Amino acid sequence: MSIRARLLTCLVPGFAVVCVVVGIVVFVTTKRGLEADLDARLAEITGMARTAMRTPAVDGRPAPGIRGMTLDRFVSRDEFSTTGEYFQLWGPDGGTERKSPNLGAAGLPYPTEFSREGAVSECTLPNGDTVRIRAVRLIQTGGRGTVDFAVAASRKDVDLRMSRLVVELVVGGVACCAALSGLLALALKVALRPLAKLGERAAAMDAESLDQRFPTESMPAEVRPIVARLNDLLARLEQGFERERRFSGDLAHELRTPLAAIRTTSEVAAKWPEQAGTEDFREIADLAARLQQTVDTLLTLARTEASAAGVSREPVELAPLVRECAALSGRMAAERNITVVESLQSGVELESDPRLLRIIVTNLVSNAVEYAPPGSRVTLACGEGARMLAVTNPAPGLSTADLTHLFDRLWRKDTSRSDHTHSGLGLAVAQSCAVALGLELVAELDPDGTLSMSLLRAK
Amino acid sequence: MRVLFVEDSAALRKPVVKALQASGFAVDSTGDGNEGWRLTRSHDYDVIILDIMLPGLDGLEVLRRLREAGNETPVLFLTAKDAVEDRVAGLRLGADDYLVKSFAVEELLARVEALARRRYAKRSPKLIVADLELDSAAKTVRRGGTELKLAPQLYSLLEYLLLRKGQVVTRTQIEEHIYDALVSPTSNVVDTAVCALRRAIAVSDDSLPLIHTRRGLGYIIEEPAE
């Protein structure tokens, strides 16, 4: 599911819920406000009714006749002639004493509950008007008992305004939700545009365009670390591809050049037999042997890379093994006037595969002896520490940049690959064996140009 | 025809040089890019065969320098690299042909001959003057239907003269194109060779002379005047 879809599915219902809650709050508040207004109006009419029902005193005595007149005047108010506001007065016997003319013959239903302050209830009149009633029980002075009266006000305006408000809230809420969703979709589109562009660029990339990098500046801050990691990955991929490309080119050269020489030598000998000699056969045999050696080493490499599981473990004493392997390069060391200095601590034993260890040590020693300048010194050291074996030799032609390629298959410092005695597979084989044994083979170059190849124990 | 062959593998260089020489080419060869570049400056080759991975200068760099210096000699790349980008890089720099190792020696010879002909703007392998016909593909020479057996050097001389039919060819040019660096031609080696060639192509007393001397200039092969 896309980020856009996720955000939309979370936020749009969220907006809807917020809109509904806001609508309900507005509805309830407005309803309460309108009903409070209605109650205030009822209280006002009630006040007027109380005033009208007060028995006035004439010369310090109550004058009930005058009360009747004020009540009549009160009932004949304009508000009581049209629908909207109502009044009814019941005598102590429960009979209707007065009522507003707009009630007609029916009158207000006799409230079930009265109070001094006024009990509020609602009902529908026979004329269809829904009203809010305030029923008041008045205790008359002078032991004249109680009278009940009720004032009522129509809810028509309130209900009308409330139903209009509901429509407005629903329409407004839906419109608001739609507008917010649209705005959200637009904002997401704008905000996610860099991601979309990133996707397009990534889709357009292939093995040929690995030198390109994703721009980080134009990316949102949240995505920038991911883009930086992607760029790192691309850089590593590019290096990997470059390494493979170089390997296949070097392999082509390693295999095709001797093959071409074999083929041409034999074709020329067949075409111009008078010019052919035994020397041609000897050359073909030499070339075939060299090809065989390259192919065998490549196969060893492929096998050690593929079958780390086939490693045996047995106690191996390091010093005799190193000495034995160094002896294999003795002839070459003598030819090149190389002094091999051994600093081998005896009694160092480890659980390992002697076959693979021999391959590693032989390759490291022969590499050092072959590439050290004539007349120089190669040092072999082994001990108890983490650095179980170190082979050092002067390497004046090597740069620190070369160290990253040293273990590449078929890599040679001489890019023309003219020296046909080396294939450039020895160190790759040694490292592959070290990995199979769970050891680490590292190359370090001192500032004075001394190369150290160290075999480190697993941490 | 004089060919320069730059290839660092001595094992491959030797049989290819042998094959080129046996086909009548004068061949200079070296295993070093710098030396190859130096040779192109001092000799006028008809075809240059270059390996790409070379010590000193690599083949691509030698070609780039050649073309920058205005040297239009046809160049054939002979290399183990067969990736499309390697071929494209070579051809973009102005290489004329590309052959991947390993190859059939016949194919190499055919390509070198085609490139040599292209240098003299000839498409057909048959070079004809009057009743004399040289087929550079079959390596045969016929006069009036009779096949002639020519020594490789005489064949090369005749081919070179025929490629420049109607033009005066100087002794120095002949020396440059027919003899490789190992032969140090003495002053009259060209005259002797031309004399021998004249004798070789005169099959009968009726045969008209085709090679003429332009005193003080050199030689020319052309249709006999009616």
Image (tube, coloured by chain):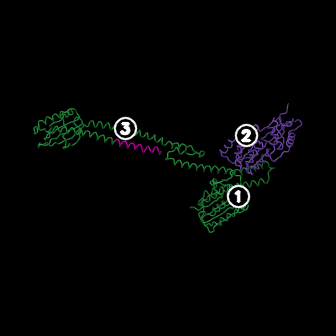
Chain colours: A green, B purple
Left or right of residue A457, residue B5 in this image: right
Instruction: Check if residue B135 falls in the magenta segment.
Output: no
Main SS type for the magenta part? helix
Q: Residue at x 34, y 37 (%)?
A: A168
* Rendered location of residue A400, percent (x, y): 63, 54
Identified by mark 1, the residue type is Pro
Callout 3 touching callout 2 (CB < 8 Å): no
Helix or strand or loop: what does disc 2 sit on?
A: loop
Q: Which residue is mark 3?
A: A172
Of residue B39 and residue B91, the one placed in the foreground of this image is: B39
Helix or strand or loop: what does disc 1 sit on?
A: loop
Chain letter for mark 3: A
Query: What is the span of residues highlighted in magenta in the rendered image?
Result: A2-23
Q: Which residue is mark 1?
A: A373
Chain letter for mark 2: B
Callout 1 touching callout 2 (CB < 8 Å): no
The residues tagged by marks 3 and 2 sit, at their Cα atoms, a distance apart of 82 Å
Identified by mark 2, the residue type is Gly
User: Are labels 1 and 3 on one chain?
Assistant: yes
Q: Which mark is residue B70?
A: 2
The residues tagged by marks 1 and 2 sit, at their Cα atoms, a distance apart of 41 Å
- First reached walking from the N terminus: tag 1 or tag 3: 3
* Rendered location of residue A53, percent (x, y): 15, 38
